[in-house]
Amino acid sequence: MKLFHKTQTAALYYLFHPGFQTFKERIKDELNLTSGINLEDIMDDSNLYAYYQQGESADFVAACICAGSC
């Protein structure tokens, strides 16, 4: 039960962190426009948040996902 609680807490953090949400939306929009890839199908928030913490640009991450190197 503790594992579920930690996951739920992490998900709530991502939901309420406006900078991360903006970052995620930019990537999602870029992927939909250029390649039709659905971001939720290929990457979860915890993996995406690592790129956000490293300061990577949303455009770079979207290009990386399209190229298949992320």
Image (tube, rainbow, N blue to C red):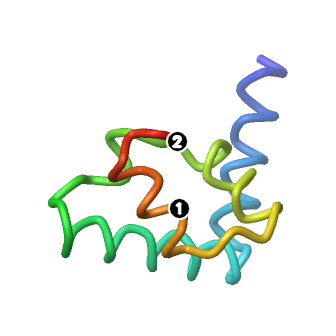
Considering depth in this image, is 16 or 64 the residue closer to the camera? 64
Provide residue 7's location: percent of width, then percent of height: 72, 35
Provide residue 42's location: percent of width, then percent of height: 38, 39
Residue at 66% in and 50% down: 11
Q: Count of labels shown?
A: 2
Considering depth in this image, is 5 or 55 the residue closer to the camera? 55
- Report the residue marked by disc 1: 61
Q: Secondary structure at mark 2?
A: loop
Say what amino acid the circle numbered 1 marks. Val
For residue 2, the mark is none
Q: Is residue 50 above or below residue 35?
A: above
In screen coordinates, is 29 left or right of 61? left
Say what amino acid the circle numbered 2 marks. Cys
Q: Earlier in the sequence, mark 1 or mark 2?
A: 1
Q: CA distance from mark 1 to mark 2?
A: 8 Å
- Report the residue marked by disc 2: 70
Considering depth in this image, is 43 or 55 the residue closer to the camera? 55
In screen coordinates, is 34 left or right of 41? left
Look at the numbered discs 1 and 2 and tell me whether their residues touch, using CB distance below 8 Å: yes
Residue at 55% in and 74% down: 58
Provide residue 46's location: percent of width, then percent of height: 67, 44
Residue at 42% in and 62% down: 63
Residue at 26% in and 53% down: 38
Q: Secondary structure at mark 1?
A: helix
The quarter holding residue 15 reads: bottom right
The N terminus lies in which quarter of the figure?
top right
The quarter holding residue 26 reads: bottom left
The quarter holding residue 57 reads: bottom right
Residues packed near mark 1 inside 10 Å, few (<14), some (14 to 19) or many (20 plus): many
Provide residue 34's location: percent of width, then percent of height: 20, 70
